[in-house]
Image (cartoon, helix red, strand yellow):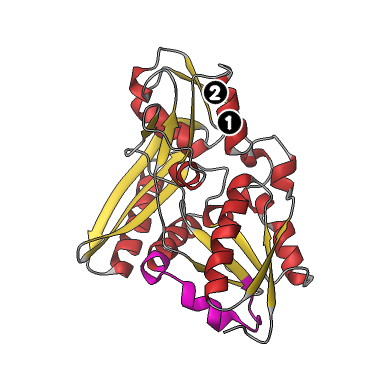
Amino acid sequence: MLFLGKQLRIGTRASKLALWQAGFVKEKLEQLGFECEIIPIKTEGDKTKKPLYDLGGKGLFVKEIEKALIDKEIDVAIHSLKDMSVYGSDEFEFVVFERDFYQDTFVSFKGNLLELRSGANIGTTSLRRRAEILRVKRSIEFVDLRGNLDTRLKKLIEGAIDGIVVSKSGLVRLGLYDESYMYDLEFMIPSAGQGVVAIEFLKDFGFKEEIKKLEDEQTRVCIDAERAFVRQLNASCNYPIGAHAYFDGNEFCMSVMYGCPKDLTKTIRYTSCDNSVMFVITDVIDYVDRVRNETSFCQ
C-alpha cells in the first residue's frame, strides 16, 4: 500500500557506508509502502581531517542533516547511531534497527595486534580505541587517521601505517571483511550505539507511527542504556568512553569503560548483569562515578 503517493526524501552523508545504510533503510521503507529518494548531504565532519576531539565531537556528522530536516528539505535522516548526540532533543525522534556487529576490528597485514613490533604505527583518532589498545600493548605509536573506510584501507595498503582500527559493522556492510588480515578486538568495549543504524525525523512527522514499526525493541533497550551511561558521565569525544549493553539469556548485561584523556593508560572498566535493566544502568553509572571521584582518577 502506498501512503497517499508520499515520496520520502532520505537525507544521508555521502560516504559509501552512509549510502549503503540509506539504501538498506530505503528498502525497509519501501516494504512499508513508501516511495523513497536518497539525498546525499556533505557534513562538516566530512570536510575536515582534524580529530573529532579537536572540533567539538560527533555532532559534526549530523548537524547539517538535521538542519535539512528542520528546513523540510528531507523527510527522514539516516545516521550511524554512534554519531548522534546522546542528549535528547525537543525537535527530533529516532528509531533503530537491530544491531549487526558491535565489535571493533584491527586490520593489518602484519598479524594481530599482539604480534606487532614494538613502536608499530596504528591509525586511529579515537581516544577510546587508543586507551583500550594501550591496556593490552603499551609499545604502540598512534597516528591520527580519519576519512572513510576506503581512505583508511588505502593508507594501510600503501604501507603508511602498520594497522588500523575500525568498526566491524562497516567492513561487513561494504563486503570488505576478510578474516585473513582482520582481527575482532573482543577485549575492546565499543562506542555507545556502535553497529546500529537509526532513522531520525521531526517529532511532528506525519508518518512517524508507520516508521516506528521498523524499530527493533531489544536493540532500543540496549542503546538507550548505553547512551544513558555516556550522558550521565557527562562525557563527549574528548573522553575515552565506551558502553556495550546486551541480553544474556534472561539477564541484561552492560560492559563499560571510562578513561582519562590526560593519561590514556588510566581506565575504569566494569560489567554488571541483572534481571533488572534499571538496576544495571544505575550500577554501572554509580560504580564508575564512585571510582573516579574516590581515587582522584584523572588528576
Q: Position of residue 109 (x, y in %)?
A: 44, 20
Q: Residue at x 74, y 55 (%)?
A: 41
Q: Position of residue 177 (x, y in %)?
A: 44, 37
Decide which of 47, 157 is in the foreground and name it: 157
Q: Is residue 90 shown above or below 223?
A: below
The residue range painted magenta reads 201-220
Where, quadrant-wise, is the N terminus in this rendering? Answer: bottom right
Which residue type does callout 2 highlight? Leu
Q: Is residue 272 left or right of residue 165?
A: left
Mark 1: give few (<14), some (14-19) or many (20+) Cα within 10 Å.
many
Q: Magenta stretch: residue 202 in it?
A: yes
Pointer 2: what residue?
Answer: 156
Q: Which mark is residue 170?
A: none
Q: Residue at x 44, y 65 (%)?
A: 224
Decide which of 214, 294 is in the foreground and name it: 214
Q: Residue furthest top?
A: 118
Q: Is residue 238 shown above or below 135?
A: below
Q: Is residue 246 shown above or below 293?
A: below
Q: Position of residue 19 (x, y in %)?
A: 62, 52
Which residue type does callout 1 highlight? Arg
- How far separated are the C-alphas under marks 2 and 1? 7 Å
Secondary structure beneath disc 2? helix
The quarter holding residue 16 reads: top right
Decide which of 192, 208 is in the foreground and name it: 208
Q: Which mark is residue 152?
A: 1
Secondary structure beneath disc 1? helix
Q: Residue at x 67, y 38 (%)?
A: 54
Q: Is residue 48 left or right of residue 287?
A: right
Q: Is residue 36 shown above or below 197?
A: below
Q: Residue at x 64, y 64 (%)?
A: 77
Marks 2 and 1 in Cβ contact (< 8 Å): yes
